[in-house]
Image (tube, grey):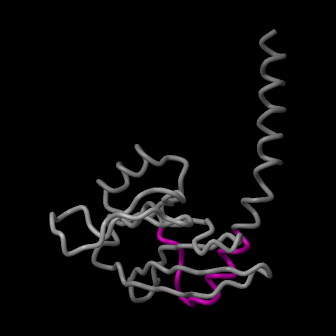
Amino acid sequence: MRRLWGCILLVLATLVRCVAAPGAQGQSRDIDRILKGFPGCHVLTLAERDSDARAFILAHFPKHNSSIVHADFDGDGQPDYAILLRNKRSGTTKLVILLCSEDITCKSVYEVDVTSDSGGVYIRPVPMGRRVSQTDAIDTKAYPPPSRLSSTGIEVT
């Protein structure tokens, strides 16, 4: 009986890998293609975060890549990318947002330097429909009221 359960688990694990692999391979090819547009850069790794950030990310987002968000940001039905990139030579880190078209061409539309926060920075998707505001940190009427996202957003922490 134990041997039967072992075989069943092995078959299930193989099926999960076969089903999940095409999407993961496609995303990996996309990332490789994107990195060609940013010579000398790589995706910021978990090991490059400080110990507190690593512990937090592993505890709260163990299955989420904290340096890549792949979702439709502009509502055109095509998945786009937000990526934390680190330059190998200079050590600078930046958040890059790329909007991708149906033919898998991605165009960088936003870059911001996050080097000063690179030890603790991570990104994650914010689902469409979520209410967001420009700031929750200060109590003022100078900012517009919260609004609902019409497409997926990116939270940078």
Q: Is residue 61 left or right of residue 2?
A: left
Residue name at image x 80 percent, y 82 percent:
103
Q: Residue 100 appears in which quarter of the rendering?
A: bottom right
Q: Nearer the viewer, residue 32 or 131?
A: 131
Q: Quadrant of the N terminus?
A: top right
Position above or below: 11 against 127: above
Location of residue 27 in the rendering, given as x and y in whole percent from the top left corner: 70, 67
In the rendered structure, the answer to whether residue 129 lies left or right of residue 80 reads left
The residue at 75%/59% (across/down) is 23
Badge count: 0
Is residue 103 left or right of 40 when viewed as pictured?
Answer: right
- Quadrant in which the C terminus appears: bottom left
Image location of residue 43, percent across then percent down: 53, 73
When the figure is inspected, residue 35 is found, relative to residue 24, above or below; the finding is below
Q: Residue at x 81, y 16 (%)?
A: 3
Q: Residue at x 42, y 81 (%)?
A: 94
Q: Viewer-proximal residue, 145 or 114?
A: 145
Q: Residue furthest top?
A: 1
* Res 33 → quadrant: bottom right
Q: Is residue 29 found inside the magenta-colored segment of the image? A: yes
**Residue 84 position within the rendered picture, expressed as x and y whole percent measured from the top left:** 47, 73
Q: Which residues are magenta?
A: 28-44
Q: Residue furthest left?
A: 139
Q: Is residue 51 magenta?
A: no
Residue 126 drawn at (x, y percent): 48, 59
